[in-house]
């Protein structure tokens, strides 16, 4: 089983917290980190936009990413939310084992 991070953004801390809690309750993540107040510049609808966003990161396993993405999309206020998975290639093996244990139902 491959541990991974899922990087996501939201429009508010409240939205990130609500989605994060739903991911934990569904055992699709072992932990959610919420980082408040990021400045984002991006293209949307043929214009460069600028907004404050919130970053939230889920620790999970790669086999759960498709279900995690679907849950986030179903609860997110954005039309096209940022949800990207990044593999974890090393680190504290005890922590990586914990991620795997916490995402098993």
Image (cartoon, helix red, strand yellow):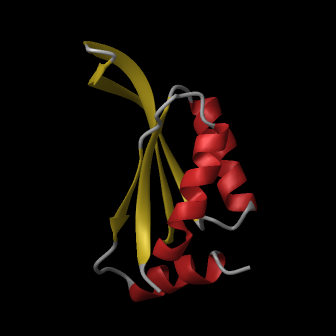
Where is 33 relative to 41, above or below?
Answer: below
Where is 4 relative to 34, above or below?
Answer: below
**Residue at (44%, 57%) from the top-left corner?**
6
Count of numbered badges drawn on the protein? 0
Where is 27 relative to 98, above or below?
Answer: above
Residue 90: image location, x then y, percent:
29, 81
**Residue at (70%, 50%) from the top-left corner?**
21
Q: Closer to the camera, 22 or 97?
A: 22
Q: Quadrant of residue 13?
A: top right
Q: Residue furthest front?
A: 46
**Residue at (33%, 73%) from the top-left corner?**
88
Q: Closer to the camera, 67 or 1?
A: 67
Residue 11: image location, x then y, percent:
51, 26
The quadrant the C terminus occupies is bottom right
Left or right: where 75 falls relative to 37: right
Residue 76: image location, x then y, percent:
60, 35
Q: Closer to the camera, 78 or 36?
A: 78
Residue 34: image location, x then y, percent:
51, 44
Left or right: where 20 falls relative to 37: right
**Residue at (64%, 51%) from the top-left corner?**
71
């Amino acid at each position: 089983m491959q541990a991974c991070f899922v990087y996501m953004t939201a429009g508010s801390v409240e939205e990130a917290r609500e989605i994060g809690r739903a991911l934990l309750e569904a055992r699709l993540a072992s932990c959610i980190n919420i980082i408040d107040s990021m400045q984002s510049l991006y293209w949307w609808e043929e214009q460069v936009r600028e907004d404050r966003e919130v970053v939230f990161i889920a620790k999970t396993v790669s086999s759960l990413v498709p279900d995690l993405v679907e849950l986030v999309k179903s609860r997110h206020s954005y039309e096209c939310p940022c949800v990207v998975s990044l593999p974890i290639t090393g680190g504290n093996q005890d922590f990586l084992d914990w991620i795997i244990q916490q995402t098993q139902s």
